[in-house]
Image (cartoon, coloured by chain):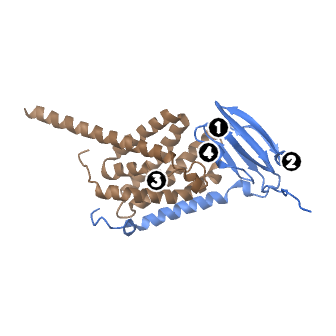
Chain colours: A brown, B blue
């Protein structure tokens, strides 16, 4: 009887974990697609510039769930975007995402004492841009991208990182921690 | 992370946030300073590269004369236009359109890239275009 009850609880917990991951992946994908429709480069004349809204989901997963959730969301989002838009988009998404996630994961340990969510978000945006320009530079065999394109992306990343951090702020503050995940 | 909902995120900023911002700005400025196109080469020329190989070069005179060409790489098609010493990707059927949105390349160090088609169009030299007047009124 106890064994069956434990199995049922475990099964329910697994389902809950699966459901939360699925919802967050869907949300990250929706935000990634949504920001493609925002013509930010009309406002800031840097081709390819994006808000990085999906980072709100990554930040939430890092701060309120487990790092594993954030990694699952990142890989799933990159795979889906790659399946829709091609191999280069997959490589871009993954390279930027992995660097950003690693940085934010490390900085999360200092959150509240040394850095705030805003600093973590800005650092994530910067490393995301560095990752993407590195992949572009390798694919195109063009190191000049580091001195022509990356500085502009880094400077605009300060603003987009700030906006993403501010957007993630109420979400993370008001949603509870889920230690069981 | 408790407190009133009206509390501003600005109150939670830490010294580390400012260090991160300073590091990002420093890196951006350092990269801008090492831009090789700004070094004083007065000879202007444009070149189109694919996978690190030069597909075509334009001299300064050719860029001023104007013209148009089409090219296909990695399954994508591009139209490149040049006039009055400047050059750009005018049309492309690549998915992200970053190359077209880059617009005109006018001076040394300007660069337009298309990752899906593995293309780089760039100008070397320091002079900015257009060097000639559009119309002379007498």
Check the image and name the residue furthest to the bottom.
B11
* C-alpha gap between disc 2 and disc 4: 27 Å
Regarding residue B93, the answer to whether it shows in the image is yes
Could you tell me which chain the residue with mark 2 belongs to? B
Residue B27: x and y in percent read: 57, 59
Check the image and name the residue furthest to the top.
B75
- How busy is the neighbourhood of tag 4: few (under 14 within 10 Å), some, or many (20 plus)? many
Q: Nearer the viewer, residue B67 or B10?
A: B67
* C-alpha gap between disc 2 and disc 1: 27 Å
Residue A8: x and y in percent read: 16, 34
Label whose residue precedes the other's in the sequence (2 or 1): 2
Pointer 2 and pointer 3 on the same chain: no
- Helix, strand or loop at label 2? It is helix
Image quadrant where residue A172 sits: bottom left
Q: Nearer the viewer, residue A130 or A59?
A: A59
Check the image and name the residue furthest to the front.
B138
**Residue B61 bears which disc, if any?**
2
Q: Are dots 3 and 1 in contact, CB under 8 Å?
A: no
Question: Which of pointers 4 and 3 indicates the residue nearer the eye?
Answer: 4
Residue at 56%, 59% in the rendered image: A155
Residue A25: x and y in percent read: 38, 41
Which residue is label 3 attached to?
A124
Which residue is label 4 attached to?
B98
Residue at 40%, 51% in the rendered image: A56
């Amino acid at each position: 009887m106890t064994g069956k009850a434990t199995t049922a609880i475990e099964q329910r917990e697994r389902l809950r974990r699966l459901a939360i991951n699925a919802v967050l992946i869907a949300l990250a994908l929706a935000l990634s697609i949504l920001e493609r429709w925002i013509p930010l480069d009309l406002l800031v004349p840097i081709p390819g510039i994006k808000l990085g809204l999906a980072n709100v989901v990554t930040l939430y997963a890092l701060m309120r769930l487990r790092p594993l959730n954030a990694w699952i969301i990142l890989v799933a989002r990159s795979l889906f975007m790659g399946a829709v838009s091609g191999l280069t988009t997959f490589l871009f998404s993954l390279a930027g995402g992995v660097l950003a996630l690693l940085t934010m994961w490390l900085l999360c340990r200092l959150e509240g004492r040394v850095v705030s969510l805003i600093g973590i978000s800005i650092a994530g945006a910067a490393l995301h841009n560095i990752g993407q320009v590195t992949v572009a530079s390798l694919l195109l065999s063009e190191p000049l991208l580091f001195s022509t394109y990356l500085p502009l992306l880094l400077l605009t990343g300060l603003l987009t990182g700030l906006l993403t951090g501010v957007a993630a702020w109420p979400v993370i503050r008001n949603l509870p921690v889920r230690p069981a995940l | 992370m408790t407190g009133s909902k009206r509390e501003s995120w600005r109150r939670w900023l830490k010294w580390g946030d400012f260090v991160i911002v300073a590091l990002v700005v420093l890196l951006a400025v350092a990269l801008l300073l090492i831009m090789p196109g700004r070094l004083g080469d007065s000879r202007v020329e444009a070149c189109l590269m694919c996978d690190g190989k030069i597909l075509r070069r334009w001299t300064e005179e050719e860029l001023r004369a104007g013209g148009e060409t089409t090219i296909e790489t990695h399954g994508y098609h591009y139209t490149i236009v040049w006039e009055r010493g400047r050059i750009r990707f005018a049309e492309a059927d690549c998915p992200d359109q970053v190359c077209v949105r880059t617009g005109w390349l006018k001076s040394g160090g300007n660069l337009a890239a298309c990752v899906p088609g593995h293309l780089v169009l760039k100008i070397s030299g320091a002079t900015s275009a257009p060097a000639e007047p559009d119309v002379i009124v007498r």
